[in-house]
Image (cartoon, grey):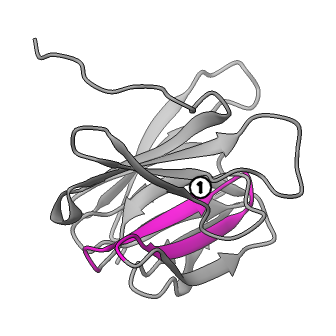
């Protein structure tokens, strides 16, 4: 077993929401949700580390956001995609330049999220609508409507696997796969 290295300095106000390693920049990005009394100006929700987990910087993608959200790889190796279910937003951020590139407020609750690594697209469930997100520009494309209570999404090759909660509490959870999505 390896040796644990790292720390927790000044992370007590952030509940973990995302973690991403950008090998091309030799950086680790931690995303958190501010967990104290709501503030009109919450503290930074993204913490940037080097590969030895020494803190480099803290920042918020956009003023007022309480969470950096789940983190995904952008098309450009300097970029990340963040999806904050707390703020109901998607954003594209250039880590190297510390610059917000795109920001999309959905106005509806965001459900499960996953990334298809083969093409970099991000897939989210908003209400019962399955949406494909182009990670190069955050363009949204509604793919279809799902009637079940989907709680998790995961890609493998050309199949989107889903976990379904049992709303009645009698049948138990279910797993399924959706093929043929492009």
Instruction: Locate residue 167: give its quadrant.
Output: top right
The stretch of residues the image draws in magenta is: 76-96
Q: Position of residue 93 (x, y in %)?
A: 47, 74
Q: Nearer the viewer, residue 70 or 100?
A: 100
Residue 69 visible, this angle: yes
Which residue of the protein is positioned furthest toward the top in this rendering? 1
Can residue 176 be found in the magenta stretch?
no
Q: Which image quarter is the C terminus in?
A: bottom left
| Helix, strand or loop at mark 1 | loop
Which residue of the protein is positioned furthest toward the left in this rendering? 1
Residues packed near mark 1 inside 10 Å, few (<14), some (14 to 19) or many (20 plus): many
Q: How many marks?
A: 1
Q: Position of residue 171 (x, y in %)?
A: 63, 22
Residue wearing tag 1 = 68
Q: Locate residue 74 relative to residue 128 in the image: left or right.
A: left
User: Which residue is rendered at x = 33% and y = 70% of the image?
Assistant: 180
Instruction: Locate residue 59: give its quadrant.
Output: bottom right
Q: Locate residue 116 relative to residue 170 in the image: left or right.
A: left
Q: Which image quarter is the N terminus in?
A: top left
> Against 180, is 87 above or below?
above
Q: Locate residue 60 relative to residue 94 in the image: left or right.
A: right
User: Which residue is rendered at x = 52% and y = 63% of the image?
Assistant: 82
Residue 113 visible, this angle: no
Instruction: Locate residue 41: give its quadrant.
Output: bottom right
Q: Locate residue 63 relative to residue 9 in the image: left or right.
A: right
């Amino acid at each position: 077993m390896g040796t644990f290295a790292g720390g927790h300095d000044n992370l007590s106000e952030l509940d973990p929401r995302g973690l991403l390693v950008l090998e091309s920049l030799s950086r680790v990005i931690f995303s958190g949700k501010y967990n104290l009394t709501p503030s009109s100006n919450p503290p930074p929700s993204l913490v940037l580390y080097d590969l030895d987990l020494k803190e480099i910087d803290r920042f918020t993608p956009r003023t007022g956001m309480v969470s950096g959200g789940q983190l995904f790889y952008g098309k450009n190796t300097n970029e990340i995609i963040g999806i904050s279910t707390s703020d109901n937003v998607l954003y594209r951020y250039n880590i190297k330049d510390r610059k917000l590139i795109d920001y999309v407020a959905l106005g509806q609750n965001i459900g499960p999220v996953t990334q298809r690594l083969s093409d970099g697209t991000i897939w989210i469930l908003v209400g019962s609508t399955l949406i494909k997100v182009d990670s190069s520009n955050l363009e949204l494309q509604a793919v279809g409507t799902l009637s079940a209570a989907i709680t998790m999404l995961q890609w493998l090759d050309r199949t989107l696997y889903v976990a379904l909660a049992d709303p009645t509490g009698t049948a138990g959870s279910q797993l399924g796969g959706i093929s043929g999505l492009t």
